[in-house]
């Protein structure tokens, strides 16, 4: 085969298969396959470090918040430390996806890591609450590109048929971050100070930055269009408005207040304008053509509803365990371990099964059913439910989430062309993020209303006064309550979680309906044949390519075989 990009010829008969493969990759022929095995392992490791950066941040920062307020003051602005990060992440997610499609995924991904690390360093050096909020927004801008970059890069390196096992591994990393984040955050704050909750990102980020720079080699892209700045601005305004509605509604402002209504109106107007701009833009931020794919649209719906249910459950399960079952709030990540471990295990199994069989429709269907069953079981908990029983219920819910977490991304990516891999990944991420915002808001409003009604009914006016400002009491406030009021509050929390989980069970019916209509389109990329491992199949394809001329029909055939070869096993 050709030894350089500009020279055609036949390779020597005894040329090493790996040299032939590396030469092919140097020419950018990687549409359906992946880099050499050692490179895949290093790249995947680097991508997992990036996922840790994205997932750990809020988990680590949350336990440090009381100490931050004690040091910097500004208690009245505390919520903005989280809100600024979340807004910047959600608003920048689709833009990062488009930048990767236009200018190359590697450059966009490295830029997002650098911005995230800059925001982390500045947040650690903040001298007042205003600075911290601003630097958290910078951090959020970078975070918006981390998860999207990971998914889009995997989507370009690995054929969909092989992608499931990698995405299952990434779900495992997410679960580890959710469990270990609060533990790490509490330990860092207690022994090194709250600033290390941000500084801890720096060594992890530098490792990811170095490894990605050194071993990730993707074809360079020459952008043929300009960024749709008007569309980006309108989408940012629309996302920001609705995230603020879900964040402020029922807490900072009443749901029917003028501020909330104005935000809803502004968000709706911006999204309508965004729709018409996208129809005319040469390079739209979110190409409407991708929604012509039935599977992509259905996966967007399933992703939104999965986010709605998952993050709502993650909010109220620890609250129930602390208020009713007497669990400690110190190791809050451990409270969710049954759900997260089940989610991790099932996600990895689903990825492997999808790789082996090429079948995936069963997982959204079974996953939706398991989520619904798990939520109904959780809705039936009362003040006498044991931790073991609730753990079993959480495991059922986690198993359902594991069936859906990465399969939705896999099918969404399989439904679009390679040139739209970035926007497909960012759209799937965005819909899940928006679903989580709406889930927390709607389930939270229902929970708060139910708790306050129950407290007023069981403890009279005094009970209603206890939860007047917030239906979620911390451990210190709960300990100060008289025994009768504490008992009333435990029954109220049980009633609130019952209502919230029941709502989640109703919502997941929509996910089941969408899953039933998914069309099982074959996943691109060939599976291993004749019992050969991925590496063996890839090596033989490289050998065949080395023995054929680079030009003509035989050369085209060799390249076609290379594109259909699976990535090496990790």
Image (cartoon, helix red, strand yellow):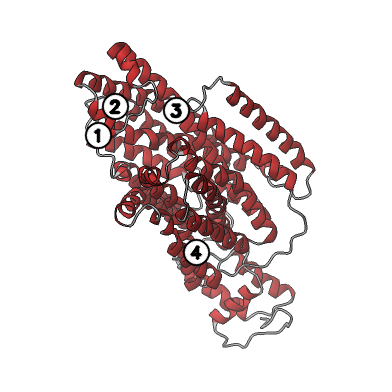
The residue wearing badge 4 is: 528
Does the image show residue 100?
Answer: yes
Residue 512 locus on image (x, y percent): 49, 33
Cα–Cα span, label 4 and label 3: 45 Å
Q: Are marks 2 and 4 in contact (CB under 8 Å)?
A: no
The residue wearing badge 3 is: 443
Q: Nearer the viewer, mark 3 or mark 1?
A: 3
Cα–Cα span, label 2 and label 1: 9 Å
The N terminus appears in which quarter of the rendering?
Answer: bottom right
Front residue of 375/479: it is 479
Q: Nearer the N terminus, badge 2 or badge 4? A: 2
Residue drawn at (62%, 67%), measured in percent from left and top? Answer: 218
For residue 381, which numbered disc appears in the image?
Answer: 2
Q: Nearer the viewer, mark 2 or mark 4?
A: 2
* Label 2 CA crowd tier, 10 Å (few <14, some 14–19, many 20+): some
Query: From the viewer's perspective, is 518 left or right of 557?
Result: left
Cα–Cα span, label 3 and label 1: 23 Å
Q: Nearer the N terminus, badge 2 or badge 3? A: 2
Query: From the viewer's perspective, is 559 left or right of 190?
Result: right
Does the image show residue 366?
Answer: no
Query: From the viewer's perspective, is 124 left or right of 90?
Result: left
Query: Splitting the image into 4 quarters, where does residue 235 fall?
Result: top right
Residue drawn at (39%, 28%), measured in percent from left and top? Answer: 501
> Which secondary structure, mark 1?
helix
> Which secondary structure, mark 2?
loop
Q: Nearer the viewer, mark 1 or mark 4?
A: 1
């Amino acid at each position: 085969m050709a030894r350089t990009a500009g020279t055609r010829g036949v390779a020597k008969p005894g040329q090493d298969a790996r040299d032939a493969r590396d030469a092919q990759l140097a020419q950018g022929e990687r549409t359906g396959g992946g880099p050499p095995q050692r490179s895949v392992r290093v790249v995947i490791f680097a991508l997992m470090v990036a996922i840790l950066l994205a997932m750990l941040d809020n988990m680590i920062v949350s336990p440090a918040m009381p100490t931050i307020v004690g040091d910097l003051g500004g208690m009245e602005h505390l919520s903005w430390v989280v809100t600024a990060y979340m807004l910047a992440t959600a608003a920048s997610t689709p833009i990062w996806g488009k930048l990767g499609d236009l200018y190359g995924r590697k450059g966009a991904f490295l830029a997002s890591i650098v911005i995230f690390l800059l925001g982390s360093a500045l947040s650690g050096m903040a001298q007042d609450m205003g600075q911290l909020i601003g630097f958290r927004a910078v951090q959020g801008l970078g975070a918006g590109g981390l998860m999207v970059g990971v998914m889009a890069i995997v989507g370009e390196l690995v054929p969909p048929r092989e992608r499931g096992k990698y995405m299952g591994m990434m779900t495992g990393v997410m679960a580890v971050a959710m469990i270990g984040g609060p533990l790490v955050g509490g330990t860092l704050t207690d022994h090194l100070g709250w600033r290390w909750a941000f500084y801890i990102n720096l060594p992890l980020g530098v490792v990811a930055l170095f490894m990605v720079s050194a071993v990730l080699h993707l074809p360079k892209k020459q952008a043929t269009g300009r960024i749709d700045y008007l569309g980006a601005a309108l989408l940012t305004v629309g996302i920001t408005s609705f995230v603020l509605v879900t964040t402020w509604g029922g807490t900072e402002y009443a749901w029917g207040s003028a501020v909330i209504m104005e935000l809803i109106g502004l968000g709706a107007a911006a999204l309508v304008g965004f729709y018409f701009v996208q129809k005319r833009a040469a390079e739209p931020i979110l190409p409407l053509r991708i929604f012509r794919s039935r599977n992509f649209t259905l996966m967007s719906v399933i992703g939104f509803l999965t986010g709605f249910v998952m993050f709502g459950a993650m909010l109220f399960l620890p609250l129930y365990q602390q208020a009713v079952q007497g669990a400690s709030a110190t190791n809050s990540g451990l409270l969710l371990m049954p759900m997260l471990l089940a989610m991790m295990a099932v996600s990895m199994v689903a990825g492997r099964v999808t790789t082996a069989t090429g079948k995936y429709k069963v997982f959204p269907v079974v996953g939706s059913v398991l989520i619904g069953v798990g939520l109904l079981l959780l809705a039936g908990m009362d003040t006498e439910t044991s931790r073991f029983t609730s753990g079993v219920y959480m495991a059922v819910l986690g198993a359902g989430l594991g069936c859906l977490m990465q399969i939705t991304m896999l099918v969404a990516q399989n439904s679009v062309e390679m040139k739209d891999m970035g926007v497909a990944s960012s759209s799937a991420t965005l819909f899940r993020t928006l679903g989580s915002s709406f889930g927390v808001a709607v389930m939270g409003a229902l929970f708060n209303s139910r708790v306050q009604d129950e407290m007023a009914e069981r403890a009279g006016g005094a009970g209603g006064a206890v939860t007047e400002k917030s239906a979620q009491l911390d451990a210190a406030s709960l300990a100060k309550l008289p025994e009768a009021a504490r008992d009333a509050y435990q029954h109220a929390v049980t009633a609130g979680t019952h209502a919230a989980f029941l709502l989640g069970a109703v919502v997941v019916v929509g996910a089941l309906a969408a899953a039933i209509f998914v069309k099982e389109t074959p996943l691109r990329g060939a599976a291993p044949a004749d019992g050969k491992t991925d590496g063996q199949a890839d090596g033989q394809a490289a050998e065949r390519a080395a023995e054929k001329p680079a030009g003509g029909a035989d050369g085209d055939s060799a390249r076609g075989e290379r594109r259909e070869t699976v990535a090496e096993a990790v």
